[in-house]
Amino acid sequence: MSAPPQTPPFKVLWLQSGGCGGCSMSLLCADTTDFYGLLRRAGIELLWHPALSLESGGELTALLADIVEGRLALDALCIEGALLRGPRGSGRFHMLAGSGLPMIEWTRRLAAKARHLVAVGSCAAWGGVTAGGGNPTDASGLQYEDDQPGGLLGADFRASGGLPVINIAGCPTHPNWVIDTLTALAAGLFTAADLDAFARPRFYADQLVHHGCTRNEYYEFKASAEKPSDLGCLMEHMGCKGTQVHADCNIRLWNGEGSCTRGGYACVACTEPGFQEPDHPFHETPKVAGIPIGLPTDMPKAWFVVLASLSKSATPRRVKQNAVADHLAVPPVARRTRLK
Amino acid sequence: MPRPSKTTRRLVGPFNRVEGDLEITLDIAAGRVTEARVNAPMYRGFEQILSGKAPRDALVYVPRICGICSVSQSVAAARALADLAGVTPAPNGQHATNLMLAAENLADHVAHFYLFFMPDFTRPIYAPHAWHAEATRRFAPQSGEQTRQAIAARQRWLTLLGVLGGKWPHTQSIEPGGSARSIDAAERLRLLSSIREFRAFLEQVLFAAPLEEIAALTSESALLEWHAQDPWRGDFRAFLSLSQALALDQLGPGPGRFLSFGAYPQADGAYALESGLWQGGHRQTVDTRVITEDASHAWFADSSARHPLDGQTVPDADKPGAYSWSKAPRLAGAVVETGAIARQLNAGQRLLIDAVQRHGGTVYTRVLARLLELARVMPLMEDWLRQLRPGEPYCLPTPLPDSGAGIGLNEAARGALGHWLTVRHGRIANYQIVSPTTWNFSPRDGEGAPGALELALTGAPVSKGEDTPVAVQHIVRSFDPCMVCTVH
């Protein structure tokens, strides 16, 4: 077998600003026996990453200068964390250490040179949790502020490769959402058609968190959890938005076999713009006349109401009891006959 | 001794491998740091964001303070809410929470050792040393053989949190009444297998010895003897070899006061690792009423020293004399150090007590403490898992009062973490967070007293031509800083 043709590595620079660093920590949970080998085999070269590189201080600022001044080509700029524009547009809520320049200014300069721009996580995509409350730091995403196009770089921004900012939204992001996006970009297999209406990669945003949820039998019968640790469906009372939220969390699992709903708590819509300010307490489902306001995606309200009341009246005793227990109180009946 | 002829001032940063952004101003004379000022150059405003929210919303927000110690933040918030409600978590929930917290803390210790701390020994400045090639083979970022194994082991290890908490970081299973995720009998066996798998990594790669053999080393002379048997066998011994070669036992002495809030509460109310203030070889009890935070040198409007329940957070980026977004926490006015070293001293780890009596809190003893903690906590996790009682509750209902206050104390990997919560009319009226690196990397206080790192950097050697002095980097990273927590 002949060796594959040599292609130059896909050079990635990863910087952090107004966030928690959790998307980087999540990235290291990528399901592989050799993290760096995974990147290398995808043709990806990490020029610098805040948690994974040796270079500090002047070594980094020299690298940034090389990119800004055109001496080093940059294939993808990954930004993790919101862009802190305050106070009063100065960006002084995050001055990149040792550089005397606000991080938003570094981001603008580097964005002008990068072939692709990737917002890693909901903070970099929309502002996210950092933009919560009264948004004290005037945080925004790279190209969105919540669901409004604009953000730091403006709605019309296109990276030199032709794409808008790619929003790998999530809080945190799933490691494989990031790996798959970078792998596709490096292979030249990522186009505008691969982005959804909010510029999220469709390979994960075309799914709903509801898909593959292990509580689906409880959902079918509207057998609902009433308190934390109950096994029932989390939609009716516990604030779960999984039937409306775009992500493949229950298909592409987290840290082995996890997901929010499998961990016992509601989907809070962390991949969606503005999730940090839902206008209701996160742990409670907002309702009008006993009906949840947020209905399953693509489901007409009248049908939902009819089906819900019908399925509630048909709930098997087993499902009803287990829904409000923290362990299987009633197992399914075992039949001796051949199942048809 | 000749008078230092000239003091030069140098701004160093960005530091990486510190979980966030960090800048330090160094005054240097005659090849030594004479003064250091530590700047956390980013502000996010969680305390402002939480104000006015429903109290339980904190359980969604606070893990997102930090991507590397999110469980620790969740636990502190859950304890503050439990304190507000007057609820004690269900025993199963307590064990599950301890397991999640320990899983995160041990993962952080491994990440710190392999990803953040050891790579600095592969720097070109050390190329003339005989050990440089071996350090590079093991610990070079992105290619080091041991580093790559450690990332893989850590990834497998964190599948524990996939089961116990749905995901990591930013699990929301942790509740004031316990855990929202019950564990059935089959899952418990799988978790036990995962724990044994990680134990195997520690015993084969990090320690190259059974954990019990490490735990049985009760004095520094015993440790040195054990090390001398085969000085490069396993990465723990490699660290000891490097530490001896570079005299890390003398580098970066801290304030000598070590604070722990106590880790892993048990059903009888005691901590598996006892709380305390360790000073001069003795443990004293901690009185949280004498904790203050002062913002005299931070970019916040109010400069007075306040107890966290009475704390204020109003940014003022133009404040004269300020140089950091971190406040300065003090215990009865004193600067303290926190972290695994404080936790293990207060918990009576005999080898560490002996080492700290000889060397104080330095780069060597800080890293030693983390590695000893790995060996000590692992068997505890196996016990807690066995103590889970299938069929009994994991989470108790926690109705919250309309008004009141709650304190949530915890030990993150990096040390003492506290949340102080005030609720009025069903809404958060004040939420103040004092995180471990805020203690360790605080700026000067109102009395002008430097923070723990500022103190530890004084006297650090600077070689000619060094841009970001390597000794400074060892000292900074020996604290395992988490800058994103610091600047919540």
Image (cartoon, coloured by chain):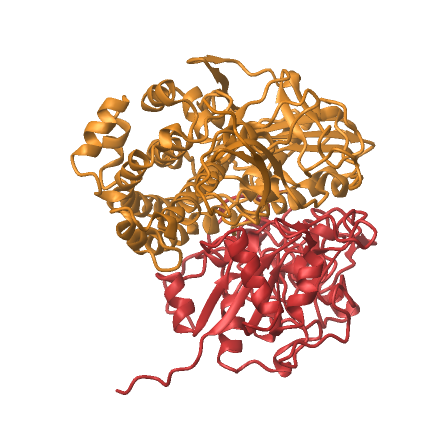
Chain colours: A red, B orange
Mark yes or no: residue B153 visible: yes
Q: Is residue B389 left or right of residue B165?
A: left
Residue B468 or residue A40, whichever sits in front: B468
Residue A249 visible in the shown view? no
Q: Position of residue B176 (x, y in %)?
A: 61, 34
Quadrant location, the N terminus of chain B? top left
The picture places residue B102, in percent across and down from the top left corner, at: 44, 37
Q: Residue at x 59, y 73 (%)?
A: A70
- State the image coordinates of residue A86 (x, y, percent, origin top left): 78, 51
Residue B245 sits in quarter: top left
Of the 4 image quadrants, the one containing the C terminus of chain B is: top right
Residue occupying the point 39% across, 54% down: B151
Picture layout, residue B430 above or below residue A75? above
Q: Position of residue B355 (x, y in %)?
A: 34, 23
**Residue at image location 54% in from the left, 31% down from the top:** B5
Residue plotted at (65% across, 62% down): A271
Image height check: is B7 above or below A182?
above
Please identify the quarter of the rendering in which residue A104 is found.
bottom right
Q: Is residue A192 left or right of residue A59?
A: right
